[in-house]
Amino acid sequence: MRILVTNDDGVYAMGLWALVRALSEVGEVVVVAPDREQSAVGTSVTLHQPLRAREIKPLVKGIKSYSVEGTPADSVILALRGLLDDKVDLVASGINEGSNLGNDVLISGTVGAALQGYLNGIPSIALSVAALEDIHFDAAAKLAVVMARIIEAKALPREILFNINLPNLPLSQIQAVEITQLGRRSYGDVIKEGHDGKRKYYWIVRGKPDWESEEGTDIWALLNDRISITPLHSNLTSTSALSALKGLSQAIFQDLGLKS
């Protein structure tokens, strides 16, 4: 099994190398990751300037490793389409410092990297731990091994994109594994102004999150010390709005002054 490991915290992040060490038990691991932190860039792709990648000395002996001057999504695309000669069987993104729950998946660089694997037809997982310091990477690393072996055994459809979040606890204290749907959380972003002596500038500051944590959601699972595994796909169509709009399509057509 050939595994591409990437992240959005940067190629030297401790979570990435915890993941590498664990997945080395399962197969051949290659690292291609951003040269710096790229949190909250989503699946942004660099199209209007060149990408540069260099091979680096790995933090785990024997692991082919590249640092990319680009986004997490850039790193995966470059790996799959340029840097790596052989096919990849799994893309693993993480282990992220901080959770990626609910609406976070729309801007998460960790999920954005895994999404590029999924869009290229490769089973992909994004792993995050709900903490920013004193992080227990070991549980997430062990879970990655379990998921990789399930995928290797072809026990699941090939079109796989899993967003996995873990509470920041020792493995022995985790209560259960839940298969979840996305919850909802918003941050109430605040704009702060400043001035550098020449012109005004702005900071977007994330406020305290507002949770909607119904049972069965990823947020509920984390709040109850459980692992959340959420299967995702790229179809963002709102089926409820689709039904409502279908009844309005003729009225919209007529309001445009068009005739059938």
Image (cartoon, helix red, strand yellow):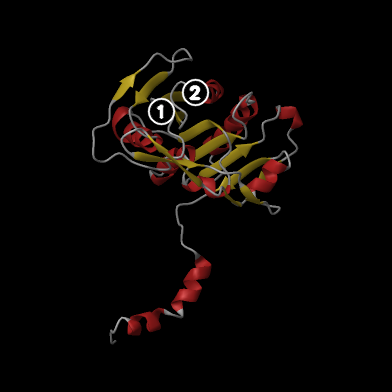
Residue 211 vs 177, above or below: the answer is: below
Res. 100 mark: none
The crowd level at tag 1 (other Cα within 10 Å; few <14, some 14-19, many 20+) is many
Q: Secondary structure at mark 2?
A: loop
Q: Nearer the viewer, mark 1 or mark 2?
A: 2
Residue type at mark 2?
Ala
The disc, 1 or 2, on the residue closer to the chain's N-terminal end is 2
Number of numbered markers: 2
Residue type at mark 1?
Ala
In which quadrant of the rendered view does residue 164 lie? top right
Which residue appears at 37% of the width and 80% of the height? 252
The crowd level at tag 2 (other Cα within 10 Å; few <14, some 14-19, many 20+) is many
Which residue appears at 55% of the width and 35% of the height? 127
Left/right placement of residue 137 relative to residue 233 reads right
Q: Residue furthest bottom?
A: 259
Quote the CA–CA distance across marks 1 and 2: 10 Å
The residue identified by callout 2 is 13
- Answer whether labels 1 and 2 touch (C-beta < 8 Å): yes
Residue 248 vs 103, above or below: the answer is: below
Image coords of residue 245 (percent x, y) = 45, 75
The residue identified by callout 1 is 33
Image coords of residue 142 (percent x, y) = 62, 28
Image coords of residue 174 (percent x, y) = 73, 34
In which quadrant of the rendered view does residue 49 lie? top left
Image coords of residue 227 (percent x, y) = 67, 39
Quadrant containing the C terminus in the rendered view:
bottom left
Q: Secondary structure at mark 1?
A: strand
